[in-house]
Amino acid sequence: MKKKLTCHCENVELEVNIPEAGFPKLMRCNCSLCKRKGAVMSPLPKENVKLVKGQDSLKLYQYHTKVAEHYFCSKCGIYTHSNPRSNHDKVYMLNVACIEGVKPFELDNIKVNDGINH
C-alpha cells in the first residue's frame, strides 16, 4: 500500500510502498546517533521508496565509517530516512512516525538493534 512520508514542514516528501502485511520489521537502534534521535524505524527495499519532493531541503549527515547516510530536513530538522551500513545497496530505514496514519506510540514489539557493536 502506498503511503506518504513527510517531514514536519512537509518540504520533504517520499512515497513509500509498504507491504500489505505491514512493516517487515520495527526497530530502534542503540548506536551513538540513533539513541539520541529515538526514532522507530523500519527497513524497506529501495525500490519501494521514491523521493517525491524536497531534494533541495534534504541534508545528509555521516560519521565514523561514512558509509551510512542519515537524511533530515534542513528546514524543520526532522529525520526522515537513512541508508544503513548493512544492506546499504538494498534498503532504506524509514522514520515510521513520518508516515501518514502511523501512530508510533501505539506500536508494539519494537526490537533494539545493537548498533554499538555493529
Image (spheres, rainbow, N blue to C red):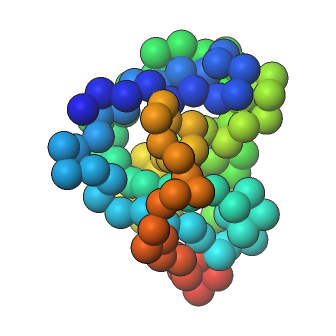
Locate residue 41, reporting x and y percent: 51, 56
Is 68 above or below relative to 72? below
Is 40 above or below relative to 83? below
Inspect this view and state whether residue 3 appears: yes
When asked about the image quadrant of residue 109, the answer is bottom left
Locate residue 110, reporting x and y percent: 48, 71
Q: Residue at x 30, y 27 (%)?
A: 2
76 relative to 111 in the view: left or right: right
Inspect this view and state whether residue 64 appears: no
Locate residue 43, reporting x and y percent: 39, 54
101 relative to 117 in the view: left or right: left
Locate residue 74, reporting x and y percent: 78, 27
Q: Residue at x 34, y 48 (%)?
A: 44
74 relative to 111 in the view: left or right: right
Q: Residue at x 80, y 28 (%)?
A: 76
When asked about the image quadrant of residue 78, the answer is top right
Is 103 above or below relative to 100? below
Indicate the quadrant containing the C terminus: top left, top right, bottom left or bottom right.
Answer: bottom right
Q: Depth check: 22 or 80 in front?
A: 22
Q: Residue at x 56, y 67 (%)?
A: 28
When asked about the image quadrant of residue 57, the answer is top right
